[in-house]
Amino acid sequence: MNTATHPITIIGAGIVGLCVAYSLRKEGFAVQVIDPEDPGSQCSFGNAGAISTGSVAPLAMPGVLKNAAKMLLEADSPLYVPPHYWLRAAPWLQRFVASATPQRVEEIASALTDLFAGALDNHRALAREIGCPQRVVQTGQLHLYRNAAALEKDAGSWRLRERHGVRCERLDAAAIRALEPAVSSDYTVAMFMPEQGAVTHPFAYAQAIAEAARQRGVVFVRDRVQGLSREAGGWRVQGAQRGYQASQVVLAAGAWSAPLLRPLGLRVPLESQRGYHLHLSSPNLSIGRPIVFADRKVFAAPMEHGLRISGTVEFGGLKMPPTPRRAAALGDAAVKGLPGLELDAPSMWMGHRPCLPDSLPVLGPVRTHPGLWCAFGHGHLGVTGSVNTGRWIADAAAGRMASERFAPFAVERF
């Protein structure tokens, strides 16, 4: 099946799928994108916009079970599994704990370092190409701790980052206040990563990528994909409205990806780590960069229009309704960290972060199903990993990158 008559079909129009579509089209491939929603309107709409190339430490670090067990049981903790979801989450959590060995952590960090290399510069180049260079900025990222003892609990993660080339600076209370005067004096020590970046309007950025792709000839289709099957020389993508023929398929449907692989004999332990945000259009203060309140696992990020407070991890699948109290708790935590913050009439959002237990996405060609590619599971780092994911898949499809580069991310690892 030739791409001249049957395009490469991308399932999913989030930031990852859009970057893949844009990169493939630049290589000259015919491309169509299928998604039931508008481009960038799901997890890519409400994220914190961070380009965290230094986030190479997996969520599961040695000792994670001891540190996380109590939080899992508390409804207001930063990490929560509702009782009705325990049985469903148990296999994922088992794999999560199993991936926290020192050797595996080093392997994961090396893979993420490779995937994120140059991501900020590549996002800047993309933003220039699509006409919104002002939306990608390098401001650094500030992680705040109440005291040295609290920082010491995360020392392993910071040492891991430094071993993998991430520039980190330790700041005292005076340096924190010089950088961010609005921060509470309760925070007396911090780690600053000056080479990190941010997208100042994630939804507008995703829309700009979609529009640039459309202008280059990418076709966008509103439909919900329900199945995939091999045909002679290609693939059939079955939507709710009709079927589509494709020369190749890239599965980039985020948290909705795993069910489409099961009928093909591929079982992927993908979970939605449901994240929340409060967006404040008039916060009554300003900060210069994304700030992480490490004790509360809360992220505050300046946006083009206001301030976004995000965070928490909640299991519960794709169908459970949002939990408003978790969003409200973000506001309470943010006010304690930024005492002058005004919480008047915030907007609330919940989205589905597609997470694998080893903190690595599923990327690259599926060996047992020629013409099928995966590009999902970027977890909390979808913006960060999106631009290089697009470039890698386009390079591989054009024959410029060996499939071995994808080995740490292969679906077959499960």
Image (tube, grey):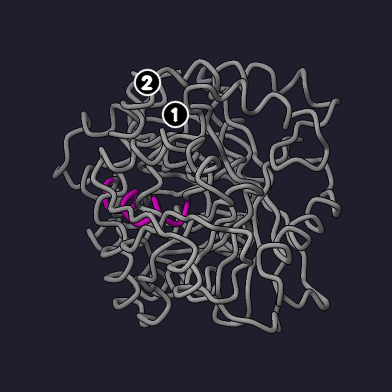
Q: Which residue is mark 2?
A: 104
Indicate the amino acid at tag 2. Arg
Q: Is residue 49 above or below residue 400?
A: below
Q: Is residue 280 left or right of residue 132?
A: right
Between 379 and 76, the one lying in front of the other is: 76
Crowding at label 2, few (<14), some or many (≥20) Cα neighbours within 10 Å?
some
Crowding at label 1, few (<14), some or many (≥20) Cα neighbours within 10 Å?
some
Q: Is residue 157 left or right of residue 256?
A: left
From the top left corner, tell me how far across and down residue 171 is, in percent: 41, 59
Q: Is residue 74 above or below residue 213?
A: above
Q: Is residue 79 above or below residue 207?
A: above
- Is residue 20 visible in the rendered image? The answer is no
Q: How many marks?
A: 2
Q: Which mark is residue 230?
A: 1
Identity of the residue drawn at 69% across and 45% down? 274
**Magenta residues, start to end:** 382-392
Indicate the amino acid at tag 1. Arg
From the top left corner, tell me how far across and down residue 373 is, in percent: 38, 37
Identity of the residue drawn at 39% across and 65% down? 140
